[in-house]
Amino acid sequence: MKFQFQHIEFVWLLAAVPLFILLFIFLLQWKKRVVKRMGDKNLVKEMTANFSPRLFTLKFLLILLAVGAGVVAVMNLRKPGGPDGIIRKGIDVVVALDVSKSMLATDLQPSRIDRAKQFVSKLINALPDDRIGLVWFAGKAYMQMPLSTDHGAAQMYVSSASTDAVPQQGTVINDALKMSANAFNTAERRFKAVVLISDGEDHDEEAIQTSAELADQGLMINTVGVGSPEGGYIVDPATGENKKDDAGNPVISRLNENELKMLAENTRGVYVRLQSSDDAVRIVKNQLSQIETRAFGDVSLMNFKTFYWWFAGAMLILLIVEAFIPERKKLAA
């Protein structure tokens, strides 16, 4: 790997260079106008005899070079100090987890959300070479963690996931798919997959259309159904009692498998109902293995040799030299 800038986003600061040049030109023009207004040219020449335009320009050029060196220092020019980092093979996987209140249903013990979290945790462990992203959704979708090889951080997010994570209620799968798709590099048409875990309780027609569009972008959606078609009661964690509707009847939440199956079929993914976490992880992992893997340098694990201090030092030296250069020249005695 060759030289690179760690913070290329600060390149816009180099716009100060042409701005300073314009200001310098404006200053020179202003000085000429002032000299003309002073009147007698011979008198002005005598009064400014010890002023050196060359030294004045040299001081400006030194300041200009110092500004450029300072910007390069901020951008942090660097180069890998050894081999090109740790080369990994893997794909990008976004896990979209349903955290709506219906995930509190107990047709899976101890609850749907707990079993779903157990599955996600095991899936992350089974994908050591892949970059993982996390999206939580209910009535709205939120990016919890962008794509990263930091699986430890991913596990922490999963362990703290709860149905209180998203205040808006519902199961908006369409929003979850769009949020998941935004996590990927749009230039890539391969190596991308979404694992969506939900009870699919609220039928989302737009999600079916969105899945077809994402399939055209090379994205595979694998769905994991949490719950049972017979359904289960939703326990209110505050009271420990079953949630009731307006008529006072216990609310039963049922798994909607049809939509989840269609999402997977549209993108050449796989649908699996979550019963055994180990079996579900095995099925999903086998499906993900069909995606071509790529080698990529894990920048977060590279040891870099940085050169910012060279440019910071050059900036300091240039400013010191500029400070000691006078604008006036020595006149012959």
Image (spheres, rainbow, N blue to C red):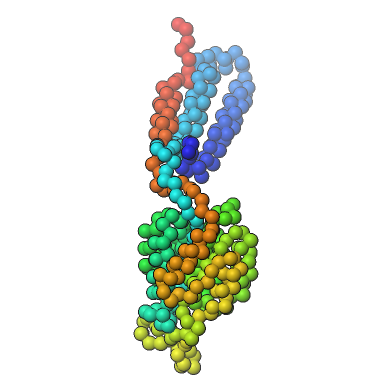
Residue 123 visible within the image: yes
Q: Name the image quarter holding residue 38.
A: top right
Nearest the viewer among 315 and 40 is 315
Looking at this view, is 24 or 130 the one in front? 130
Residue 143 visible in image: no
Q: Is residue 118 left or right of residue 189?
A: left
Q: Nearer the viewer, residue 20 or 98?
A: 98
Q: Position of residue 244 (x, y in %)?
A: 45, 89
What is the tally of numbered marks visible in this picture?
0
In this rendering, position of residue 45 left or right of residue 82: right
Looking at the image, residue 307 lies above or below residue 104: above
Query: Where does residue 289 sit, x and y in percent of width and height?
Result: 50, 60
Which part of the image, by quadrant, shows the C terminus? top left
Residue, x 56% and y 74% (percent of image)?
261
- Residue drawn at x 41%, y 48% as measured from the top left: 300
Q: Is residue 182 above or below residue 227?
A: above
Rendering quarter of residue 121: bottom left
Residue 251 in the image: state x and y as whole percent.
47, 87
Residue found 42% across the figure and 43% down from its top: 85
Res 220 quadrant in image: bottom right
Seen at 60% across and 22% down, the residue is: 35
Q: Nearer the viewer, residue 105 or 292?
A: 292
